[in-house]
Amino acid sequence: MERKMAPSLMCIDLMNIEHDLRLLEKAKVDYLHIDIMDNHFVPNITLSFDFIHGLRKITSIPLDIHLMINNPENSFHYLKNCNPEDIICIHYEATTHVHRALGMIKDLGAQVGIALNPGTPIGVIEDLLPDLDSVLIMTVNPGFAGQKLIPSTLDKIARLRNMLDESGYQNILIEVDGNVSFENAKLMHEKGANIYVGGSSSIFHKESSIIENCHKFREIIYS
Ligand code: DX5
Ligand code: ZN
């Protein structure tokens, strides 16, 4: 089963980005999770497309771009120079024409991801499976780091894993995002998650170093 670590850069020390980025490189993380918010789809603004352009100049770690913006298809022109390993993930709830938007991501040459808010049932993506490389299960309500896991989302991971396997789409990866703590990562792993977004309660946990946290996180998701 694929297991990938994706540190959430909205939780990084923004005053020491390059320093901490080199630690993430040393820890061999699989993706850099980049939260882009528009203060409309979610009540917050975090990282930006300019941040992405700057990041590409200093690291080759693939980007896992989580777009928490309305009508994301209107912003894809900012993501033209993505690489094939990058994930561009839009929210199912953020556009009327989700199938068309997913096709536009594919045309950009990136991996195609869709995110579901905690209240959105997994059934809504049934007719999108042929167009997907990953499904992101929000395990908190999107918009802020430091929130607490919504317990019912654990079962949702298992139900999605079952739905994908039963319908012949077992290669679609499940990403989990929101309070993916060391303890919760273990539970999510048992439910069938593949890509783990580590934020303030794990990879960027203040009580230990990024290197120690990544080591502990990797041990858990590979257990
Ligand atoms: C929340 C973002 C998450 C967040 C995770 O909307 O999508 O990536 O940064 O932060 P923690 O791990 O602290 O919940
Ligand atoms: Zn995110």
Image: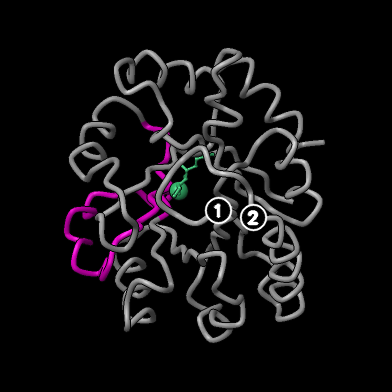
Q: Is the C-beta of the residue carrying label 1 under 8 Å from the nearest atom of ligand 1?
A: yes
> What residue lies at 69% left-to-right and 70% top-to-bottom?
160
Q: Does the residue labelled 2 lie within 8 Å of ligand 1?
A: no
Amino acid tagged 1 = Val
Res 130 label: none
Query: How many C-alpha atoms fall within 10 Å of the one at disc 1: few (<14), some, or many (≥20)?
Result: many
* Image vertical order of residue 111 relative to residue 31, above or below: below
Q: Which residue is drawn at 33% across and 20% down?
A: 17
Residue 116 % position (x, y): 51, 67
> Badge 2 local density, few (<14 within 10 Å), some, or many (20+)?
some
Quadrant in the picture for residue 215: top right
**Quadrant location of residue 101?**
bottom left
Q: Nearer the viewer, residue 130 or 135?
A: 135
Kindly report the distance in space between the C-alpha atoms of the residues bearing marks 1 and 2: 6 Å
On the image, numbered disc 1 is attached to which residue? 140
Mark 1 vs 2: CB contact within 8 A: yes
Please tell me which of labels 1 and 2 falls first in the chain. 1
Magenta segment includes 66: yes
Residues in magenta, as a range: 60-87
Q: Which amino acid does label 2 sit on?
A: Ile
The residue singled out by tag 2 in the image is: 150
Who's the residue at 19% across and 68% down the image? Answer: 74
Image location of residue 188, percent across then percent down = 73, 50
Q: What kind of colouring is applied to the model shown?
A: one colour
Quadrant in which the C terminus appears: top right
